[in-house]
Image (tube, coloured by chain):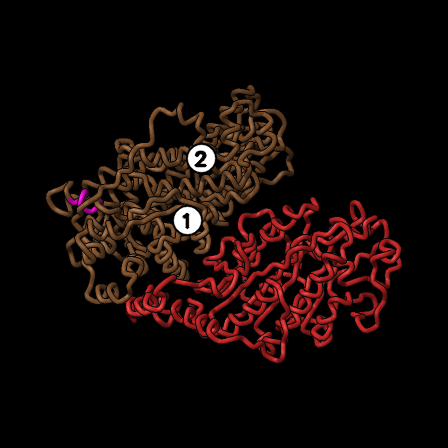
């Protein structure tokens, strides 16, 4: 029984692959983050907010990275970071709520895709800290997971007054060697001890990584700490809110782009070679309208970008089929169509993280055409 | 705002407006209620705690047949018979007849959840999260306070068996009606009726796409979703001996049943109907039995009756198959006896299911009479819901089941009505072993008074049990071991520690 448990319960100290999902809530403007600067139509449609060609940030012969995302460039160049353009969902309501819901559920299905992944993967996630949502509430994507920890910070864990004595008591009561329940209890106590060690010592990110400020950056840093402490983390979610800007969008989006790039760059640098067992996916519910509006902003659109960084990723390129921006291609009120469904980006990632035969259950009612993200 | 704008404008009566303002029980309605809040049926003690070294039969039935013993429960049940064994059996008999048990307090507690009693069409007037919130909190409140504990345990059992996740489409509005009219109405009734009610439940027709299952043109292929789960999860079980052909034939027999959704014109939202022009009228062969083709030229009313007859016949064929009795018996034994139910007990229970004509009460009576049920004491892991509710019951907590409790359960992956797939929350212990941290954390939160809108009075309770060891025996359902006593005193947080201990995780 003991031997079986070791493989079954994500233990303390055993290495797990970790999937980190960053959701940019509000609809991030993929056309300005990864700009099709070689497309003439792009400059005509966005005369005032379009990016100019910039040699230092050139991604390939067609796309340029936004200057505020420059910290992502080294990762892209070294092949750790891949970009998928014209990615998104089939939802055409252009409603934040509907689009986020659909994307987090993984279709018109009950529960979230990450939750199903954790439940149906091999072996199923059943550790005390296998799934963590950084924030105040459970994201829809994690709904249905076997056990979920929602926390704002590592300081959230507490047994209140006399915690020390309480924990000692638990150690004695859960000492029975031959018992499955007690083994699970000891496993949890081990995870707790690791978290306490993290809390006690000031954390210095490796390789001079600097995460920056704000809840998102702190969240990424905590995820890095938990991964390094090997608490058995298999999935972590984190939001970077506030991308919904309809006028003067640089006011809102600029600081967020800086934050996004700095945090992500720091995370990959901090983890170094450990990144081999980690994947970070950055997604948003939809992109923005192709045409700028009269107020230097953009309205709700369709296709946007996704970023995927981590082990085995075929980085250094912009994946996905670029549909072009001519009038006959644009969708509805003038939006970049979606040529790569977000599930087809997630599918190869989940496969790498142990989804195995469960992929069809994780994304039902969708004919998967997994993107060749790894190579 | 509980109601959406449409309802708000529509509502002329002051009562609804008061309700919309968010009061728990509107004053205008309160005076119209037939009775004042009943007093809480919690005895003050002193109480006699369990005295055996191991879990005795009385503690055993309180563990398995209820969501946990309250202060005084052990003593009360103990007095029902001359021996612990006889007392425990008498308690089961009492619980098998919920309609004879007074339950004013729990009934009063859930009156404030106005959505629970709304007719199915009216449910669409509410916001989805209000419906889910009231359903979750009412489920918790009933589990904590109802005197009809076995009924409530079976409500949970069937909710898992016929699982519907309200986050899928119209189920958000319809699950409330399913909980009331299907699950609760038949929880201790007859399985055939329960199955029929579920097959015709608007929520089930949405959840498993039954309403999309139609054949109006020769090339239409039936939607097999419900047909498959009906065989695989609701009746025969995955190895029950049916074939893919059977699934397709069952789907054909169910073509034409649908439910009026918000998209349909006119009145009758949520009404279930049979549309003969969407029904596949050919002969079907199901599990070796034939449902004949329709006679040509039936009149309209005759066609509807023919469709209804076909559904009845279909369910009869499935129910008569021996695999159904076995599958239901196995699941019941897993719930009440062990993760790996002993074959001998399953045999007995399956036989009772068949001979009683799928009567749930008789089937359970047979289960509770097996020697295997009485032998398996203190060996099952409580699922998180059971753990939380039993901790609240054991400490005599005063609570209105706030959102906080639902959040705690969400963290453990066991909040009511949040399971994503039709198989329902697992009963076995393994998937729940990752929840220890949150169990321990809840034990301290509860005892330190950190759970919102929830009060415990541990000093008074300890005194009522004649001191620490009596209190421990009450929590554990047996005398504490020397090691438990030592840990209890060393921790400075003894009651929380006992609630967090392996002994309290089991039932």
- List the residue tagged with mark 2: B24
Image: B390 above or below A239? above
Q: Position of residue A39 (x, y in %)?
A: 86, 60
Q: Position of residue B338 (x, y in %)?
A: 30, 54
Helix, strand, or loop for circle 1?
Answer: loop
Name the outermost residue toward the bottom: A207
Q: Main structural element of the magenta stretch: helix, strand or loop?
A: helix
Q: Position of residue B425 (x, y in %)?
A: 43, 51
Q: CA distance from mark 1 to mark 2?
A: 16 Å
**Residue shown at 50%/38% (left/top)?**
B131
Q: Toward the viewer: B273 or A136?
A: A136
User: Start and end of the magenta stretch?
Assistant: B73-78
Name the outermost residue toward the left: B82
Is residue B280 rendered magenta in the image? no
- List the residue tagged with mark 1: B452
Give the quarter of the figure containing the C terminus of chain A. bottom right
Question: Residue B356's mark?
Answer: none
Helix, strand, or loop for circle 2?
Answer: loop
Q: Is residue B345 left or right of residue A42?
A: left
Q: Position of residue A319 (x, y in %)?
A: 73, 65
Image: A80 above or below B75? below
Q: Which chain is red?
A: A
Q: Is residue B396 left or right of residue A6?
A: left
Give the quarter of the figure containing the N terminus of chain A. bottom left
Question: In the figure, residue A356 lies in which quadrant?
Answer: bottom right
**Residue shown at 40%/67% (left/top)?**
A188
Q: Is residue B154 left or right of residue B27?
A: left
Colour chain B is painted in: brown
Question: In the figure, residue B51 lies in which quadrant?
Answer: bottom left
Q: Estimate how packed mark 2 is, as few (under 14), some (14 to 19) or many (20 or more) residues with alpha carbons within 10 Å.
A: few
């Amino acid at each position: 029984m003991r031997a079986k448990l070791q493989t079954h319960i994500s233990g303390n100290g055993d290495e797990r692959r970790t999937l980190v999902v960053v959701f940019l809530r509000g609809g991030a403007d993929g056309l300005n983050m990864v700009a099709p600067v070689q497309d003439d139509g792009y400059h005509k449609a966005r005369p005032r907010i379009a990016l100019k060609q910039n040699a230092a940030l050139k991604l390939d012969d067609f796309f340029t990275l936004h200057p505020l995302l420059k910290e992502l460039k080294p990762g892209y160049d070294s092949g750790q970071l891949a970009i998928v353009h014209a990615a998104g969902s089939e939802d055409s309501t252009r409603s934040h709520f509907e689009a986020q819901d659909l994307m987090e559920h993984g279709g018109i299905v009950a529960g979230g895709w990450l939750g199903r992944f954790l439940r149906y993967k091999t072996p199923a996630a059943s550790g005390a800290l296998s799934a963590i949502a950084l924030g105040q509430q459970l994201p829809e994507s994690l709904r249905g997971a076997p056990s979920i920890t929602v926390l704002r910070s590592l300081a959230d864990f507490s047994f209140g007054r006399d915690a020390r004595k309480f924990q000692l008591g638990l150690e004695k009561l859960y000492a029975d060697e031959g018992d499955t329940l007690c083994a699970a209890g000891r496993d949890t106590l081990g995870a707790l001890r690791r978290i306490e060690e993290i809390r006690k010592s000031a954390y210095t990110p490796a390789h001079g990584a600097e995460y920056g400020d704000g809840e998102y950056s702190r969240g990424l840093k905590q995820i890095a700490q938990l991964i390094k402490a090997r608490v058995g983390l298999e999935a972590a979610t984190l939001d970077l809110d506030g991308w919904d800007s309809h006028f003067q969008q640089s006011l809102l989006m600029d600081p967020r782009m800086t934050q996004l790039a700095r945090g992500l760059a720091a995370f990959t640098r901090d983890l170094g070679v450990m990144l081999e067992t980690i994947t970070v996916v950055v997604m948003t519910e939809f992109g923005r309208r192709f045409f700028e509006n009269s107020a230097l902003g953009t309205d709700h659109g369709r296709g946007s970008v996704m970023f995927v960084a981590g082990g085995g990723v075929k980085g250094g390129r912009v994946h996905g089929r670029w549909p072009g921006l001519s009038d006959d291609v644009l969708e509805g009120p003038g939006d970049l169509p979606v040529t790569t469904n977000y599930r087809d980006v997630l599918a190869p990632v989940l496969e790498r993280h142990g989804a195995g035969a469960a992929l069809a259950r994780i994304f039902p009612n969708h004919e998967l055409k997994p993107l060749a993200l790894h190579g | 705002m509980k109601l959406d704008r449409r309802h708000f404008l529509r509502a002329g009566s002051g009562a609804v407006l008061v309700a919309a303002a968010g009061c728990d029980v509107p004053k205008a309605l309160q005076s119209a209620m037939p009775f004042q809040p009943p007093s809480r049926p919690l005895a003050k003690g002193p109480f006699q705690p369990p005295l055996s070294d191991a879990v005795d039969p009385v503690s055993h039935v309180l563990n398995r047949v209820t969501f946990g013993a309250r202060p005084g429960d052990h003593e009360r049940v103990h007095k029902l018979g001359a021996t612990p064994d006889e007392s425990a059996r008498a308690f089961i008999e009492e619980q098998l007849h919920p309609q004879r048990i007074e339950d004013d307090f729990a009934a009063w507690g859930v009156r404030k959840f106005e959505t629970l009693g709304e007719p199915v069409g009216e449910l669409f007037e509410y916001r989805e999260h209000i419906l889910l919130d009231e359903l979750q909190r009412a489920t918790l409140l009933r589990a904590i306070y109802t005197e009809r504990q076995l009924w409530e345990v079976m409500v949970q059992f069937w909710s898992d068996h016929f699982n519907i996740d309200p986050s899928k489409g119209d189920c958000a509005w319809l699950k409330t009606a399913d909980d009331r009219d299907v699950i609760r109405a038949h929880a201790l009734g007859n399985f055939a009726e329960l199955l029929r009610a579920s097959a015709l439940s608007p929520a089930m027709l949405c959840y498993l796409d039954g309403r999309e299952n139609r054949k109006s043109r020769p090339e239409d292929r039936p939607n097999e979703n419900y047909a498959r789960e009906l065989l695989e999860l609701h009746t025969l079980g995955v190895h029950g001996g049916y074939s893919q052909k059977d699934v397709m034939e069952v789907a054909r027999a169910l073509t034409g049943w649908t439910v009026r959704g918000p998209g349909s014109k006119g009145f009758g939202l949520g009404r279930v109907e049979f549309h003969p022009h969407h029904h596949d009228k050919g002969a079907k062969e199901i599990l070796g039995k034939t449902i004949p083709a329709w006679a040509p030229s039936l009149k309209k009313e005759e066609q509807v009756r023919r469709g209804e007859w076909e559904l009845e016949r279909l369910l009869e064929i499935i129910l008569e198959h021996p695999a159904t009795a076995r599958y239901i018996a196995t699941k019941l034994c897993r719930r009440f006896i062990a993760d790996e139910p002993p074959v001998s007990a399953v045999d007995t229970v399956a036989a009772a299911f068949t001979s009683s004509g799928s009567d749930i009460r008789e089937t359970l009576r047979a289960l509770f009479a097996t020697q295997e049920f009485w032998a398996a004491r203190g060996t099952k892991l409580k699922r998180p819901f059971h753990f939380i509710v039993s901790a609240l019951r054991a400490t005599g907590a005063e609570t209105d089941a706030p959102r906080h409790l639902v959040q705690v359960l969400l963290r453990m992956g066991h909040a009511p009505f949040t399971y994503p797939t039709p198989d329902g929350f697992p009963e076995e212990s393994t998937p729940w072993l990752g929840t220890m941290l949150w169990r321990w954390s809840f034990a301290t939160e509860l005892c330190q008074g950190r759970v919102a809108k929830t009060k415990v009075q541990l000093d008074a309770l300890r005194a009522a049990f004649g001191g620490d060891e009596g209190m421990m025996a009450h929590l554990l359902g047996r005398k504490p071991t020397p090691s438990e006593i030592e840990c209890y005193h060393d921790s400075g947080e003894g009651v929380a520690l006992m609630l967090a201990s392996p002994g309290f995780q089991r039932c």
